Image: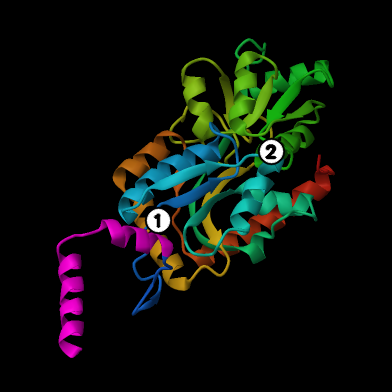
Amino acid sequence: MMIAMKHVAAAALFACASGVVATASVQAAAAPDRGPGGPGQGYPNRPIRLVAPFVPGGPTDIVARLVGQKLGENLGQTIVVDNRGGASGAVGMEIAARSAPDGYTLVIGSSGNLAVNPNLNAKLPYDTLKDFQPITQTTSGPQMMVVHPLLPAKSVQEFIALAKAKPGQLNYASGGAGTTTHLASELFKLSAGVSIVHVPYKGTGQALTDLIGGQVQMMMSSMLPAIPHVKAGRLRGLAVTSARRATTLPEMPTLAESGLPGFETTSWHGMLVPVKTPKAITMRLHAEMVKTLNQPDVKERFANQGMDIVGNTPEQFAAYIKSESQKWAKVIKVAGIKPQ
């Protein structure tokens, strides 16, 4: 009996050493990532889903696809971007929050669905602070005030003058009610003293498409998806929302320089996983995320689109989410913004 057991063990070792992976792959895909070292050993051993809570074409989708591809290469597994748009990101965030906390579902959160929505809707199907474990903030960058090129306004002041001459007749697009594209425009309305009509979309990509088509006149867009259209002449950029000019478009003034002193907003994204994901897995994801973000080609790609790489710790990202939530809570209250 003992001899037979030894032969079985030897055969098993030989099969592994010989690279017989077909059966092993099936077993690995079905088994949890546990080994002698505990949860996380052998992770990842199958494709990972990355939930992007907005439709394709917008800034969240662009960040998800670039980071997801490079992160997958570093992890040695395919990362599949799963676009789940709707309800200003709430649909995708709920899907991620309710997923198994095993490291095989990640989510790209944005300033809108992590810091803004919780202050607008007390009945969200997810809790930013309780349902997710932050991994790292990926990027941060200004937004850009863009208009249709046929609009007779070539500066912020000319747009303000036009809006005051036609109160309630101009409109602006946003990536959805409660997103930062919405709040930045509402802050602009308050600062400039103008009346323009909000037209919410299911994502920034759709909003930009209609802006290019002339269905709407203005938008406070993230720079990432807007810059190619501005450079191609399909849109006209008037100003950026940051305190300083963007390095990628140094000729474009800030809104503060354009007659609205103190105006400043940013658009940011970050990676999270469902709460209770094993610490060994979150630590692995954090290490690989920071490595991914600091690859020269990734940094260059985001820099060309007006985005800065962050790559902070989970604790720093969690604290930043809280501080941004407090900031937008004040803006929402002063502007009297209600969920739509």
Marker disc for residue 184: 2
Q: Can residue 311 be seen in the rendering of this structure?
A: yes
Pointers 1 and 2 in contact (CB under 8 A)? Answer: no
Callout 1 secondary element: helix
Displayed quadrant of residue 320: bottom right
Upstream in sequence: badge 1 or badge 2: 2
Please tell me whether residue 65 is drawn above or below residue 97 in the rendered image.
Answer: above
Q: Is residue 36 left or right of residue 125?
A: left
Picture coordinates of residue 193 (x, y %)?
A: 80, 31
Where does the image place residue 4, in percent across and percent down from the top left?
A: 18, 83
Q: Amino acid at mark 1?
A: Met
Q: Residue at x 46, y 60 (%)?
A: 312
Say which quarter of the image contains residue 19: bottom left
Find numbered disc 2 in the image and state the secondary structure of the residue it sits on: helix
Quadrant into which the N terminus falls:
bottom left
Read off the magenta span. Answer: 1-30
Q: Look at the image and tell me in which quarter the C terminus lies.
A: top right
The residue furthest bottom is 2
Which amino acid, mark 2? Ala
